[in-house]
Image (tube, rainbow, N blue to C red):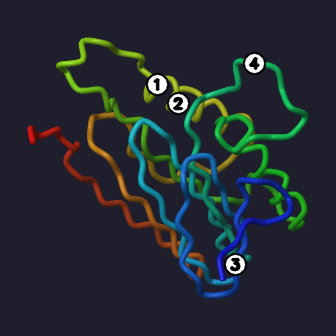
Amino acid sequence: MLELDSKGPARLKHHGGEKVFLLPGQWYFGHTGATVKTLLGSCIGVTLWHPRRKMGGMCHFLLPTRKGASTGFLDGRYGDEAVALLADEIKRSGTKTQDYEVNLYGGADTMPEEAKVKFNIGEQNVEKAWSIIDQYGFQLQCVDVGGNEPRNVTIDLTNGQVILNRGKAPTARKV
């Protein structure tokens, strides 16, 4: 049964073979054969895979970094903190960040042209993700960022395979 882990409000734990769906701000790390999936717009999804140890995970962050004062706890909603949470798990597992293959997805521009307002959150998220990957020394394997289409990303933690599906950006319709 999938449930929140006691290590924090955004960490998920499960029993082997379950399917995990990450919501914004959530993350998962393990080696028990989970399939981890998320849906991304302007958010960023980072997948991790250790090919020799057959372990990995994913995070789904909304914003590049926290603007206000810290609560004293790392928060998976922010890119720098979400990856720090994963890096802590990597350290606890006795492995090194440099040994992980990493994929980077998301960062779409999800504001409709009619809005005439651009916050560039997706672009800011992508820039932050690049710097975080460099900071931790991850081995970048695949990148699919930008554009204006949402992405479904799935990583199979039995073999490290990542599946990316791009969809058309949702459009509003009159009722």
Which amino acid, by three-letter code, is at mark 1? Ile
C-alpha separation, residue under disc 2 versus residue under disc 1: 6 Å
Return the residue at label 1.
121
Which amino acid, by three-letter code, is at mark 4? Gly
Tell me where residue 138 appears, x and y as whole percent. Answer: 67, 48
**Among numbered discs 3 and 4, the one appearing first in the sequence:** 3
Residue 21 shown left or right of residue 93 in the figure:
left
Return the residue at label 4.
68
What secondary structure is found at the residue carrying circle 2?
helix
> Mark 1 and mark 2 in contact (Cβ < 8 Å)?
yes
What secondary structure is found at the residue carrying circle 4?
loop
Which amino acid, by three-letter code, is at mark 2? Asn
C-alpha separation, residue under disc 3 versus residue under disc 4: 32 Å
Which residue is rendered at x = 30% and y = 26% of the image?
111
Which amino acid, by three-letter code, is at mark 3? His
Q: Which mark is residue 125?
A: 2
Residue 111 shown left or right of residue 171 in the figure:
right
